[in-house]
Image: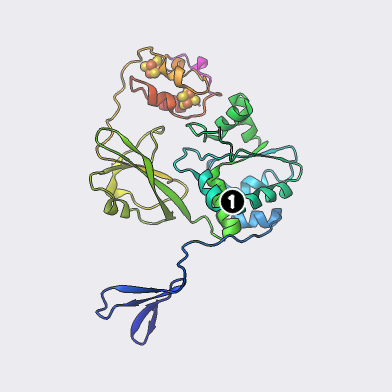
Amino acid sequence: MLSHNGTKVLAPVNGVATLTADQKFFQIKQDGSWSTSSIYQFKSYDFSSLINAFDEGALASLDIVEMPLKDYFLKFKSNPSIQIVLSPFSRYQHLDFEEMILTSMKEAYSSFIELLKTTFPKVEVKNFFEIPTLKFEHPNGIPEYFLHKQFQWDVKKAKKSLQSNEILYLGAETIYHILRKLYFGEPFTKRHLAVFLVDRKGRMDLEPRQFFLTNGQSLAFIPANLDKRYKIASFDTVFEAIQPMDVNSLGYFNIYEHYAITLYEKLPAVRKEFSCIDCLECNQYCPTQANPFQLIKGKIEEFDKEKCVSCGICTVYCPAGIDIRKRIEEVV
Ligand code: SF4
Ligand code: SF4
């Protein structure tokens, strides 16, 4: 903000804002188009400048937990016997990043695929974007499950291929932020927060509202702007252990942890645990046949923890309200 002839003047990107005569409001005079995002610009990278760009942009994998992209890519540098997998899904598919990339970043996406091919010339790039038959359903966004389904590998092999860096895995949200940094000059300082609403009858509004927020931004605007009936909030999805909080105490946006928020009209009923009724729903819905039923029955050795992808589905379906997820955490 500059001071000019006694009147405060702002100089936004391509316009001028001045205070009104009574000094109460700003008025903005726009000069040309008012672009709120950068434009695509092709840039070429070699391995070293790519790593530097990841570092400079503070990019992290949003698929592999707590993994800076710089460190992740360095693990693959001198290994020609890997595969690169580009998944169209994000972990909980809070937003459709495949569609966002293909509608407004297609050129950048093609450039990135070419970049991967030249950076890793002997490596096969398996691109799962634009496959109409590939529809999202949880847990397709969990990397080991995605590999298990797409390559028909058993879950153990899929987990091992990720742990031993035989697969360089990039999900759609991670790719979205890579493209923003490499071809639009935008570092990883902003991320989408999807907001879901659950009414007092427990019905969820399936069309999320989305905000593109800056790391560290106060979340007080959420209760100030959304329907006042929604007083309870949680950053966890229905597949995770929900920790409800007062919507007025959301604090600040943490770019590495927050991607979705659910607002409840009424506190979700605290699930009371009853005894197992042997209905076997948990086993029936477990997508990897890990046999969680035996874990609840105390036969820990018969629960195949190597097959479990921690998707939380068994807990959601258990009619006795048993927190199977928590029992799994105790043994893995
Ligand atoms: S045991 Fe439960 S958490 Fe593990 S994979 Fe099966 S359904 Fe998912
Ligand atoms: S779903 Fe729950 S009640 Fe049914 S068998 Fe599994 S643990 Fe028992």
282 vs 50: above or below? above
Q: Residue at x 51, y 40 (%)?
A: 90
Image quarter for ligand 2 equals top left
Q: Residue furthest bottom?
A: 5
Whether residue 84 is visible to the viewer of this picture, yes or no, is yes
Residue 124, image quadrant = top right
Residue count near mark 1 (Cα–Cα under 10 Å), binned few <14, some 14–19, many ≥20 = some
On the image, the x and y values in percent for residue 306 come to: 56, 24
The span shown in magenta is 298-305
On the image, the x and y values in percent for residue 221 come to: 31, 55
Q: Residue at x 27, y 81 (%)?
A: 21
Q: Is most of the magenta stretch helix, strand or loop?
A: loop
Residue 276, image quadrant = top left
For this view, does 217 lie left or right of residue 249?
Answer: right
Q: How is the image coloured?
A: rainbow
For this view, does 218 lie left or right of residue 127?
Answer: left
Magenta run includes residue 300: yes
On the image, the x and y values in percent for residue 129 come to: 59, 40
Q: Secondary structure at mark 1?
A: helix
Under mark 1, the amino acid is: Lys
